[in-house]
Image (cartoon, grey):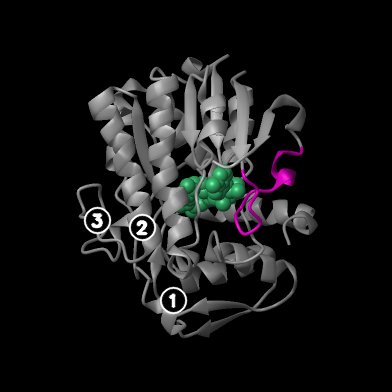
Amino acid sequence: MLDTLRGKNVLITGGLGFIGSNLAARLLEHDAHVTLVDSLIPEYGGNLFNIHEIQDRVKVNISDVRDVNSMRWLVKGQDFLFNLAGQTSHFDSMADPFTDLEINCRAQLSILETCRKCNPEIKIVFASTRQLYGKPEYLPVDEMHRERPVDANGINKLAGEGYHILYNNVYGIRSCALRLTNTYGPRMRIKDARQTFLGIWIRRLLENRAFEVWDGRQKRDLTYIDDAVQAILLAAANEAANGQIFNTGGDGPISLKDLAEMIIEIHGEGAYEIKPFPADRKSIDIDDYYADFNRIRTCLGWEPLVPLREGLRLTLAYYRQHLEHYV
Ligand SMILES: NC(=O)c1ccc[n+]([C@@H]2O[C@H](COP(=O)([O-])OP(=O)(O)OC[C@H]3O[C@@H](n4cnc5c(N)ncnc54)[C@H](O)[C@@H]3O)[C@@H](O)[C@H]2O)c1
């Protein structure tokens, strides 16, 4: 099925970020012609080191997806658009909701309008998020669960996702969305907790400092990056995905306390402290979340293959080798 991507022109927004750079490397294995667009705003996950092994084989355009002129130029002639650029911090989306709105909502509509005018044949995969479900009413959460975001990021991503499905349904611009759960692995941002709590845990662990676990009883599921990339590629290659929304998931729920203990055990040493949630974080926390991913399993034949323990081992090995480029 992934042969559909062979030799194709692909554009990845957010291509210097965690998921985008890993996706780029996989697409090169399929002989795709890859262009990356990224704004490299320092607070986000873009990092030129993420592509140091592939930089000679991809085109890189440092621009902002909010820039309509850049996007018009970049979208032309592309067969696939992997639309991954986003502001990912839930906390920052509350501190600065308008920037989140501009990137996660308005720019998404603008990209779709550009596609409608300049390249309606393009196929789009949008990186959506489990955050838009809010606090689950039942578990595991399937795609029928209602959307009740608890922060501005969830609201804006929901609108961004909605526009993709709208343009698929009304204009026939083939689009689908993956509601990604916590995704982790090499090339994620570990400087702070803006992208994921796991990032700062890993940084502290490797710097021989205790990391904080807030509460610790909350359950989460995690997808290793290679599995997330495979889900994105299957969605791109499969026409049955058009107009669809899919959850991704992991190999089962785990409490944050158990996750902390697992990562310390894999590393061989380390310490963590259980702390109460800071009040401003608690008010936007979603408590337990894990996904039902039967829809993507049935429709696209996807399931996570990398066990959590193995994914964490690979992740730690990467950052042990390359820590200085990520802190
Ligand atoms: N990693 C996860 O656990 C996870 C979970 C759910 C959803 N997602 C979604 O997946 C997508 C990719 O996330 P990621 O984890 O790779 O994060 P990331 O921060 O590493 O990647 C996002 C990239 O987008 C770029 N970007 C941000 N605003 C931009 C703009 N205005 N113009 C151009 N580039 C811009 C950033 O520089 C960054 O490189 C995001 O849309 C995110 O919402 C990720």
Q: CA distance from mark 1 to mark 3?
A: 20 Å
**Contact flag, marks 1 and 3 (Cβ < 8 Å):** no
Mark with earlier residue (3, 2): 3
Q: Position of residue 253 (x, y in %)?
A: 39, 60
As helix, strand or loop, the secondary structure at mark 2 comes to helix
Q: CA distance from mark 2 to mark 1?
A: 14 Å
Residue visible at 71% across and 51% down in the picture: 318
Q: Which residue is mark 1?
A: 281
The quarter of the image holding the C terminus is: bottom right
Q: Which residue is mark 3?
A: 147
As helix, strand or loop, the secondary structure at mark 3 comes to loop
**Contact flag, marks 2 and 1 (Cβ < 8 Å):** no
Q: Residues within 10 Å of mark 2 (few under 14, many from 20)?
A: many
Give above or below for 135 relative to 278.
above
As helix, strand or loop, the secondary structure at mark 1 comes to helix
Residue 150 versus residue 1: which sits nearer the camera?
150
Mark with earlier residue (1, 3): 3
Q: Is residue 27 left or right of residue 294?
A: right
Give the numbered dot on residue 154.
2
Residue 202 versus residue 103: which sits nearer the camera?
103
Q: Position of residue 98 (x, y in %)?
A: 44, 59
Give above or below for 70 relative to 5.
below
**Contact flag, marks 3 and 2 (Cβ < 8 Å):** yes
Q: CA distance from mark 3 to mark 2?
A: 9 Å
Residue visible at 50% across and 49% down in the picture: 86
